[in-house]
């Protein structure tokens, strides 16, 4: 398959050294990931590494009392962070929350590329560090912020990674993502809609006022995104995503 890396929508592949792309190119294949497709299972060996080009993956931590999202991965990132750090097992579950396309490579081929390159692992370690910063901010915000502030941040993070300003998500999924009960999600959505920041209807949320969401997030959004740009590169939002965002109404 002739993969056009210069136009791929995955930021990490665009930022790779050309020699590293040559190492990966013969083993990468494109795939479409349906809703709830499992990418990693906590405690299990990692078999594949996914470089999303669209859609969204959730990294979810589980415990007896319930589940909570600890991070999200879109076109800016990759799964398989443990492999970059020298482990071969997943710490948390990872599954597709918004369907989309991805480049996928066998874990063994990916590790071989890491082992034969002086530049690939350092780049991806910077991404892993940026993802760790995102996860630590999630923990801080979940502990310190109101549900509507947490929801505002989460919607902004999704808005950075999806086409347009329309996010397909159910109340049930939002409750898992935010680690709260469904009635709390319903109230938070009503608060945001009452402030004309979003329009919510069954199974989807439409962003109406992005700047208003940033204000409501009270600093929870922005710092991890700036750290990504510092550590990895200036590719923070796909140009085609900005062009396709619908006007607010």
Image (cartoon, grey):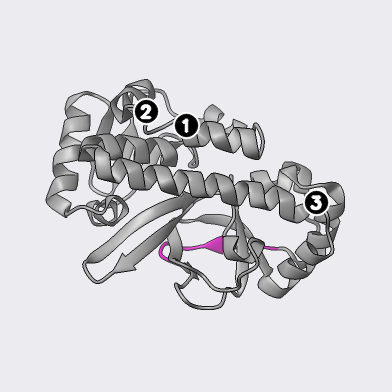
Q: Position of residue 81 (x, y in %)?
A: 58, 60
Question: Would residue 32 be counted in the magenta stretch?
Answer: yes
Residue segment shown in magenta: 29-36
Tag 1 and tag 2, C-beta contact below 8 Å: yes
Which circle marks residue 219 in the picture? Answer: 2
Q: Position of residue 57 (x, y in %)?
A: 47, 56
Q: Which element carries disc 2, helix, strand or loop? A: loop
State whether the magenta stretch is mostly helix, strand or loop. Answer: strand
Q: CA distance from mark 2 to mark 3?
A: 34 Å
Of the pair 104 and 3, the residue shown nearer to us = 104
Q: Position of residue 183 (x, y in %)?
A: 12, 49
Residue 215 sits in quarter? top left
Label 1 Cα neighbours within 10 Å, binned few <14 / some 14-19 / many ≥20 = few
Position of residue 113 in the picture relative to residue 178 (left or right): right
Q: Is residue 22 visible?
A: yes
Q: Which element carries disc 1, helix, strand or loop? A: helix
The residue shown at (65%, 61%) is 84
Which circle marks residue 223 in the picture? Answer: 1
Residue 165, placed above or below residue 26: above
Question: Would residue 141 be counted in the magenta stretch?
Answer: no
The residue shown at (55%, 35%) is 227
Mark 3 or mark 2, which is nearer the start of the sequence? Answer: 3
The residue shown at (80%, 60%) is 25
Position of residue 82 in the picture relative to residue 15 (left or right): left
Residue 91, placed above or below residue 171: below
Residue at far bottom of view: 44
- How many marks the image carries: the answer is 3
Which circle marks residue 119 in the picture? Answer: 3
């Amino acid at each position: 398959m002739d993969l056009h890396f210069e136009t791929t929508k995955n930021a990490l592949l665009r930022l790779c050294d050309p020699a590293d792309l040559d190492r990966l190119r013969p083993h990468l294949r494109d795939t479409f990931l349906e809703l709830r497709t499992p990418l990693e299972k906590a405690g299990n060996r990692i078999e594949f590494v996914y470089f999303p080009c669209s859609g969204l993956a959730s990294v979810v931590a589980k415990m007896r009392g319930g589940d909570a999202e600890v991070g999200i991965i879109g076109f800016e990132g990759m799964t398989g962070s443990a492999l970059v750090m020298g482990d071969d097992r997943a710490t948390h579950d990872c599954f597709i929350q918004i369907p989309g396309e991805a480049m996928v490579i066998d874990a063994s081929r990916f590790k071989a590329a890491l082992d034969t390159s002086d530049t690939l692992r350092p780049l991806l370690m910077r991404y892993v560090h940026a993802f760790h910063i995102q996860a630590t901010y999630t923990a801080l915000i979940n502990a310190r912020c109101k549900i509507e502030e947490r929801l505002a941040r989460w919607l902004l993070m999704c808005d950075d990674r999806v086409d347009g300003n329309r996010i397909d998500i159910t109340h049930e999924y939002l409750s898992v993502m935010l680690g709260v009960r469904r009635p709390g999600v319903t109230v938070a959505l009503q608060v945001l809609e009452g402030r004309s920041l979003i329009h919510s209807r069954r199974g989807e949320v439409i962003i109406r006022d992005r700047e208003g969401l940033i204000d409501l997030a009270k600093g929870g959004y922005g710092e991890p995104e700036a750290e990504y740009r510092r550590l990895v590169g200036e590719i923070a939002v796909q140009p085609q995503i900005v062009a396709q965002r619908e006007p607010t109404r």
